[in-house]
Image (cartoon, grey):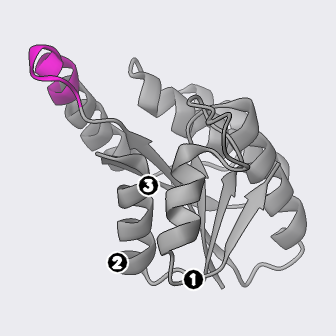
Amino acid sequence: MKILMCTDGSFYSDNALAYGARLFCNSKDHEVVILYVMPEVHEEFKFYERKFNEEVKKFKEVKLKNVETVDDLKNIKSTDLSIKILENAYKLLMKFGFESKTKARIGNAAHEILAEADEGGFDLIIMGQYGFSKAKKSALGKVASVVVTNSKIPILIVK
């Protein structure tokens, strides 16, 4: 099974990652990709978007799949918040003995999650109920609501 685990660095997404890892860690037949979507940047802050793209390029060159322990991961120097979020998610899954890949995208979180799920041929999406933008009127957060409504594949929402 190919599983897309989504993170935004929040407590809720960490819970979703841990729960997903506990569900699937006994089987080595699963391919897991951790996805972080960085929001699009307003024009006056485009410098930071370029910096993010540079950091993602460096991150991809590191090839995390060759990292065997958390100590190995400490040797990776990162300055960008998005890289830290992916590193923390990767470390969390490593604690459960899970080897995962990481991916970063830029744009609307819900649309990018749906696009990644479709393009990557995933069988399941795992995500937290809320992220950093809690929608108090809805049972789900804003991003989760859009993903649930529009996804063609099953979604596991973790509270």
Residue 44 shown in magenta: yes
Tell me the quarter of the picture where residue 131 sits.
Answer: top right
Please tell me which residue is depicted at 35% across the width and 68% down the height of the picture: 115
Say if the magenta span includes residue 118: no
Q: Residues within 10 Å of mark 2 (few under 14, many from 20)?
A: few
- How busy is the neighbourhood of tag 1: few (under 14 within 10 Å), some, or many (20 plus)? some
**Rounded to the nearest whole Å, what is the CA distance between mark 1 and mark 2?**
12 Å
For mark 3, what is the residue?
110
Q: Is residue 135 above or below residue 139?
A: above
Q: Which residues are magenta?
A: 41-50
Q: Main secondary structure of the magenta part?
A: helix
Image location of residue 119, percent across then percent down = 34, 78
Q: Quadrant of the N terminus?
A: bottom right
Query: 54 or 71: nearer the eye?
Result: 54
Above or below residue 8? Residue 126 is below
Residue with the mark numbered 2: 119
Residue visible at 17% across and 16% down? Answer: 45
For residue 48, which quarter of the picture?
A: top left
Q: Which residue is mark 1?
A: 153
For the point 79% across and 61% down, which residue is it?
20
Q: Amino acid at mark 2?
A: Glu
In the depicted view, which residue is nearer to us: 14 or 150? 150
Q: Secondary structure at mark 3?
A: helix
Labels 3 and 1: the sequence-earlier one: 3
Q: Nearer the viewer, mark 3 or mark 2?
A: 3
